Image (tube, rainbow, N blue to C red):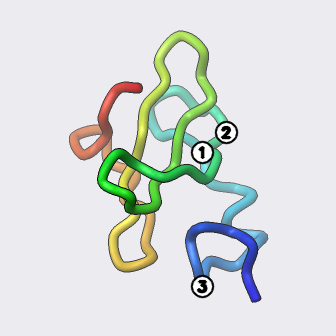
């Protein structure tokens, strides 16, 4: 059973995902709507990326500032 909030994502894939804007590491989180998302760890420009149907949407246009 996966311990990631993004079920079905292989651990090795999860490890290589990075913020497409800053290159920062992404961490599992839950958005204000209760849905899973990924948060950028960049201290100067933290962004949140949605996860739709178990797939991270790493598009700057879909990101929201944290």
Q: In the rendering, at what x and y percent does residue 60 appear?
A: 31, 39
Mark nearer the N terminus (2 vs 3): 3
Between circles 1 and 3, the one closer to the viewer is 3
The quadrant where residue 15 appears: bottom right
Which residue is painted at 30% across and 54% down in the image?
33
Mark nearer the N terminus (2 vs 1): 1
Label 2, residues with CA under 10 Å away: few <14, some 14-19, many ≥20 = some
Label 2: element kind: loop
Q: Nearer the viewer, residue 58 or 49?
A: 49
- Mark 1 vs 3: CB contact within 8 A: no
Q: Gap between marks 2 and 3, in whole Å?
A: 19 Å
Q: Gap between marks 2 and 1, in whole Å?
A: 5 Å
In the depicted structure, whether residue 47 falls above or below residue 12: above
- Quadrant location of the N terminus? bottom right
- Mark 2 vs 3: CB contact within 8 A: no
Which residue is painted at 31% across and 40% down in the image?
63
Say the numbered circle drawn on residue 58.
none
The quadrant where residue 7 appears: bottom right
| Residue bearing mark 3 | 8
Say the numbered circle drawn on residue 25.
2
Label 3, residues with CA under 10 Å away: few <14, some 14-19, many ≥20 = few
Relative horizontal placement of residue 33, taking residue 58 as reference (left or right): left
- Mark 2 vs 1: CB contact within 8 A: yes
In the depicted structure, whether residue 41 falls above or below residue 12: above
| Residue bearing mark 1 | 18
Q: Nearer the viewer, residue 63 or 33?
A: 33
Q: In the rendering, at what x and y percent does residue 17 appear?
A: 62, 54
């Amino acid at each position: 059973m996966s311990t990631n909030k993004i079920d079905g994502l292989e651990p090795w894939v999860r490890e290589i995902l990075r913020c497409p804007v800053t290159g920062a590491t992404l961490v599992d989180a839950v958005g204000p709507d209760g849905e899973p998302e990924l948060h950028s760890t960049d201290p100067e420009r933290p962004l949140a990326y949605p996860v739709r149907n178990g797939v991270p949407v790493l598009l700057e246009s879909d990101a929201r500032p944290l």
